[in-house]
Amino acid sequence: MALHWDTDRDEHLARHGVTTAQADEAFAHEDALTINPDYNSKSGLGIRTIGYSASYGDLLSVLSYFDNDGVQQGTTAFRANRKDRRYYFGQE
């Protein structure tokens, strides 16, 4: 399953050194961990998925939400931070 990405997200993700394809790869990884709601979500609607992207070569944190039409929209993705790595490896 792939997320829907608005066209402006390409430039945003590039600032993190990530492509939408790499984010989708991490999002769909068989061992991906989903935290819903995202622990940093102010609205309570944000979803954090931590997964491995082989083409990136590391764990990525992928943030998303469901829009009013039920489509899961990607918002950003970045190299997983220490906290997300602890969650992923069951240490948090």
Image (cartoon, grey):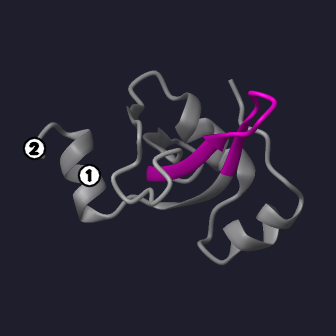
Residue at the far left in the pictured view: 91
Nearest to N terminus: mark 1 or mark 2:
1
Kindly indicate the quadrant of the structure image that contains residue 36. Answer: top left
| Residues shaded magenta | 59-74
Crowdedness near tag 1: few (<14), some (14–19) or many (≥20) residues, C-alpha within 10 Å: some
Q: Is residue 33 magenta?
A: no
Locate the N terminus by quadrant: top right
- Residue 65's x, y, as percent? 62, 43
Q: Is residue 12 above or below residue 92?
A: below
Q: Which residue is mark 1?
A: 85
**Labels 1 and 2 touching (C-beta < 8 A):** no
Left or right: where 64 falls relative to 59: right
- At x 61%, y 37%, the residue is 25
Label number found at residue 2: none
Task: In this rendered view, identify the residue nearer to me: 51 or 46.
Answer: 46
Q: Is residue 22 above or below residue 77?
A: above
- Residue 42's x, y, as percent? 45, 60
Disc 1 is placed on an element classified as helix
Label number found at residue 91: 2
**Magenta stretch secondary structure, dominant:** strand
- Residue 61's x, y, as percent? 46, 52
